[in-house]
Image (tube, rainbow, N blue to C red):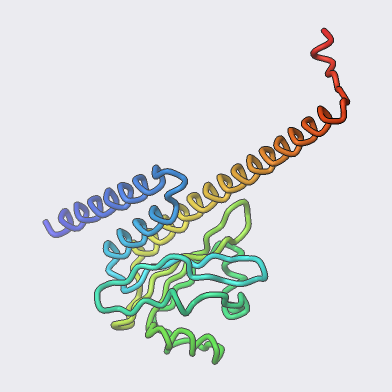
Amino acid sequence: MLEKAVISQSFEQQAHVVEILADAISAHVCDADLAIEKILSGMGILSGVDRAYVFQRKPGDLLDNTHEWCSDGVAPMIDVLQNMPMDIIAPWREGFERGEPLHVPSIDAIDLAPELRELLEMQGIVGILLVPVQWDGSVMGFVGFDQVDQARPFSSEVLRILIAVAGAVGTILARAAANREIIRTKTELEEAVTQLRHLVMHDDLTGARFTSRSRRR
């Protein structure tokens, strides 16, 4: 009976994961931030972690904490984790490039560079789980879960959840970037058309005329 209850609970959790991700991915492209926030809150609660967040890479080899969810009583850190040099996570960067997750059940149990340990302790982190966000073979950033109450290993199920979160966040961010590129291209075309109209008006004033091939047919 206990085994059946565990299996049933696992299926329910998986169904909840699928529901959260499907709802977020189906959101309008303009609602990317809201979609990511829903993923973090839903998955954070489901996984029983203290923080869930997204870091995005930006020009200059810098990192920004762009999205964050915190459980009750846990201090948010998003405002102080901006414009961070990628070098701060240098020990983990090679693994991220290979698409490997980072699981540190207790930061006291591993060797860390002084500045990295200080950064984690400043946030009250005792355990951390990170998964890189990749698109077209490039690392766009990473998603993470923190434990601040007590150090304990993250289960394999929680790791699978965070891997799913990384995939969904990567899809949403890539789609939003593509939409921004479409808008940028459209704006440039509209500006080019406006400039062309100004030229035509100027030519009307000077008396010059242009005839296209299509109008000669």
Rendered location of residue 15, percent (x, y): 27, 48
Q: Residue at x 46, y 69 (%)?
A: 130
Tally the marks: 0
Which residue is farthest top?
217
Towards the viewer: 200 or 14: 200
Q: Residue at x 41, y 46 (%)?
A: 25
Rendered location of residue 131, percent (x, y): 48, 65
Rendered location of residue 126, percent (x, y): 37, 84
Residue 198 picture quarter:
top right
Which residue is farthest bottom?
114
Towards the viewer: 27 or 119: 27
Does 28 sit left or right of 91 as displayed?
left
Rendered location of residue 4, percent (x, y): 16, 53
Dividing the image into 4 quarters, which one contains the C terminus?
A: top right
Dividing the image into 4 quarters, which one contains the N terminus?
A: bottom left
Residue 120 picture quarter:
bottom left
- Would you place residue 207 above or below residue 35 in this image? above
Towards the viewer: 42 or 95: 42
Residue 13 picture quarter:
bottom left
Q: Residue at x 25, y 50 (%)?
A: 11
Does 85 sit left or right of 147 as displayed?
right
- Would you place residue 26 above or below residue 101 in this image? above
Q: Residue at x 69, y 43 (%)?
A: 188
Does 131 sit left or right of 184 as displayed?
left
